Amino acid sequence: MSTTPQAEDLDDARGVAAVVFDVNETLFPLTPVRDRMAGVGLGPQRLEPWFRAVLVDGMAAAVTDSLVPFAELARHHLEVELAQAGLPQEDATVEGILAGFDEVVPHPDVLPALEALGAVEVEVALFTNGSARIAEGFLERAGLGDLVHHVWDVQAIGRWKPHPDAYRWVVAQLDADPDEVAMVAVHPWDVHGAVAAGLRGVWVDRDARGHYPPGFHRPHHTVVALPELVERLGLH
C-alpha cells in the first residue's frame, strides 16, 4: 500500500545553492505526443505504457553502466506499439509522433516558480534523461530561457538517472556540495536516486494523492505545486 511521504524539512545553516528540475512530465505534460499517437491510430491510453517502457530500458542500461539514448528507445518502443496495434511502422509515422516533444507547453505553475526562484537569486538548472535540445527548445518557445542557467542531459555522463553518477555529475557542474542542491521531480524514482546520492529530494505530487512507493528514499520535501519551492526550501 502506498503511503503519503512526510516532509523532512531541513533547518541546516548551509541552505540551498541550486535547484535542479527534471524535465519530462515535471515541467510539461506529454499531451502533444499523446495526441499524435492517437492521430495515427494508437489509443491515447498507450502514452503511459510506451513512456514507461522507454524509462525501464534506459534505466536497465544504466544499471549495467551503459547508455542508450532516449530517442533510440523512444523510436523502438513506438515501433513496438504500432506493430502490436497492427499499424505500419514507418519512419515518418514514428518521427511524426516524436515531433510532439517540440510542441510541449509548461504546466501552469512553472513560470511563477521560476520567477520566484529568480527573485531569490538561486541557480536553476534542468537535467533530463531525454534531450537537452528539446528542453532548450521548450524554454525558448515558452519564454522561460532567461530564468534557467543550465540545461543538461545525461549524454555527458553516460548513465541515465537514477544512477548516482548522473546526480554526482550535476553537483560537480554546479561546484556545490550535494546537500546544497535540490532535485525536483514528479517521478519518485528520480527523487529516490537524488536522495541516495546525497542531494535534497523534492517530490512534486501534482494530484495530491501521496502515492509514493514504499522502500524508496523519502523526499525531504513534498509539494503539490512548484511555487511552493521557495518557502519549503527556506529560500529568501
Image (spheres, helix red, strand yellow):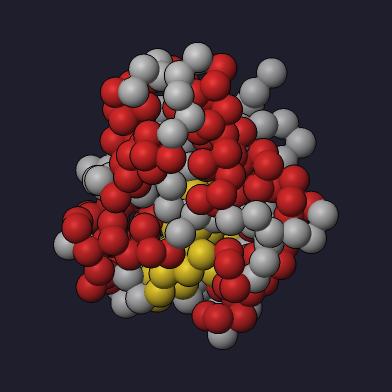
Residue shown at 57%/34% (left/top)? 77
Residue lying farthest to the bottom in this orientation: 175
Residue 141 makes an appearance in the image: yes
User: Going by the image, does 84 lie left or right of 38?
Assistant: right
Residue 7 makes an appearance in the image: no
Which quadrant holds the N terminus? Answer: top right
Work out whether residue 145 or residue 111 is closer to the camera in this orientation and state it. Answer: 145
Give the image location of residue 76, x and y in percent: 57, 39
Work out whether residue 154 or residue 109 is closer to the camera in this orientation and state it. Answer: 154
Question: Can you say whether 51 is above or below 95 in the image?
Answer: above
Residue shown at 37%/39% (left/top)? 92
User: Going by the image, does 163 lie left or right of 117?
Assistant: right
Q: How many marks?
A: 0
Which quadrant of the structure image shows residue 41? top left
User: Going by the image, does 17 lie left or right of 116?
Assistant: right
Give the image location of residue 108, x and y in percent: 23, 43
Residue shown at 71%/67% (left/top)? 165
Question: Can you say whether 170 is above or below 142 in the image?
Answer: below
Which quadrant holds the C terminus? Answer: bottom left
Question: Can you say whether 50 is above or below 69 in the image?
Answer: above
Give the image location of residue 206, x and y in percent: 40, 34
Residue shown at 65%/23% (left/top)? 2
Which quadrant of the structure image shows residue 167? bottom right
Work out whether residue 121 or residue 175 is closer to the camera in this orientation and state it. Answer: 175
Work out whether residue 128 or residue 174 is closer to the camera in this orientation and state it. Answer: 128
Residue lying farthest to the right in this orientation: 64
Give the image location of residue 205, x and y in percent: 46, 36
Which quadrant of the structure image shows residue 28? top left
